[in-house]
Structure formats: structure tokens, C-alpha cells
Amino acid sequence: MSGFRTDKRFIRRARELKTIAAMLRLYCRAHHDTQDALCSACSDLLDYAERRLQRCPFGDAKPTCNKCLVHCYAASRREQVRVVMRWAGPRMLRHHPIMGIRHLIDGRRPTPSLPDKKARKTDTSADD
Ligand SMILES: [Zn+2]
């Protein structure tokens, strides 16, 4: 986890993970009566989101997950995350304005097409 956070290649994903974590905290506190820590179901979901992000084929060109073409989440997880995001999204601007605004801006970025597996090591030449 620490490698994931500090590796420069993962900055955007680390930010997305932070946003997801913040949304889950808001959601969990309001719905599962927790204080500082997440309940086991929510921390399980966060672990899952982290693993998915680490494997995201877009790398740091990834769009925000709700816009993504690759539905890498299992259906049940996707539904869980969607419920959390729908509830927490509007509240993010109040509780974490900077993070919320960044997430909105990231959400406006165009969705990139899936990178070619062979060309994935160098993402500098996106001319096709
Ligand atoms: Zn919870």
C-alpha cells in the first residue's frame, strides 16, 4: 500500500483511492454507525477498490471509474460502489471540497481508449 501511494506513476490513482476512501468514510459513518474506522464490509470494499486500481489497464491515464469503459469490478462490487458514490458524491463538496472538486474535474476528462498492451510501457506517443 505504501508503495502504491508513493510511486509517482500512481499519483492519479492514489488520488482516486483517497477520494474513494473519503466517500466510504462518510457513507460508513452515516449508515453503519462507525466513528473513525470503517466497518468490515466497507474496509473490504476499499481493499477491493485498491486492488482494482492497482491493476487498472489505463495506468494514470485512467478516467474516473464511473466513466470508465472497462468494467473491472465484479457486478456485486460495482453495485456497492455505485450506491456509496451516489450517496457520498454530493456530500464530498461539503466535507472535502478540494477532493470533491478535483474529482469532478477528473470526471470531465475525456475517456481515453484502451491502451494497446504492447504500447503500454511508453504512453508518450498516443498518435493513433
Ligand atoms: Zn460501513
Image (cartoon, rainbow, N blue to C red):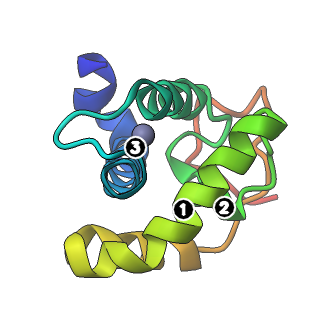
Q: Dot 2 surroundings within 10 Å: few (below 14), some, or many (20 or more)?
A: few
**Mark 1 or mark 3, which has the lower sequence index?**
3
**Residue type at numbered disc 1:** Met
Mark 3 is on which residue type?
Leu
Q: Nearer the viewer, mark 1 or mark 2?
A: 1
Q: Residue at 51%, 69% (x, y): give it.
A: 87
Along the viewing direction, whichever of 30 and 23 lies nearer the viewer = 30
| Residue that label 3 marks | 17
Q: Which residue type does callout 2 highlight?
A: Asn
The residue where tag 1 is placed is 85
Q: For the point 29% across and 35% down, which residue is it?
A: 8
Q: Quadrant of ligand 1?
A: top left
The span from disc 1 to disc 3 (Cα, nearest Å) is 13 Å
Query: Is residue 75 rendered to the left or right of residue 101?
Result: right
Q: Report the disc number at residue 66.
A: 2
Instruction: Please tell me which of labels 1 and 2 falls first in the chain.
Output: 2
Pinpoint residue 16: horizontal percent, then vertical percent.
Answer: 42, 51
| Quadrant into which the C terminus falls | bottom right
Name the element at disc 1: helix
Q: Is label 3's Cβ within 8 Å of ligand 1?
A: no
Task: State the residue lying farthest toward the left.
Answer: 36
The picture quadrant where one finds residue 40 is top left
Q: Residue at x 78, y 29 (%)?
A: 117
Q: Is residue 53 visible?
A: yes
Rendering coords of residue 53 (x, y %): 54, 34
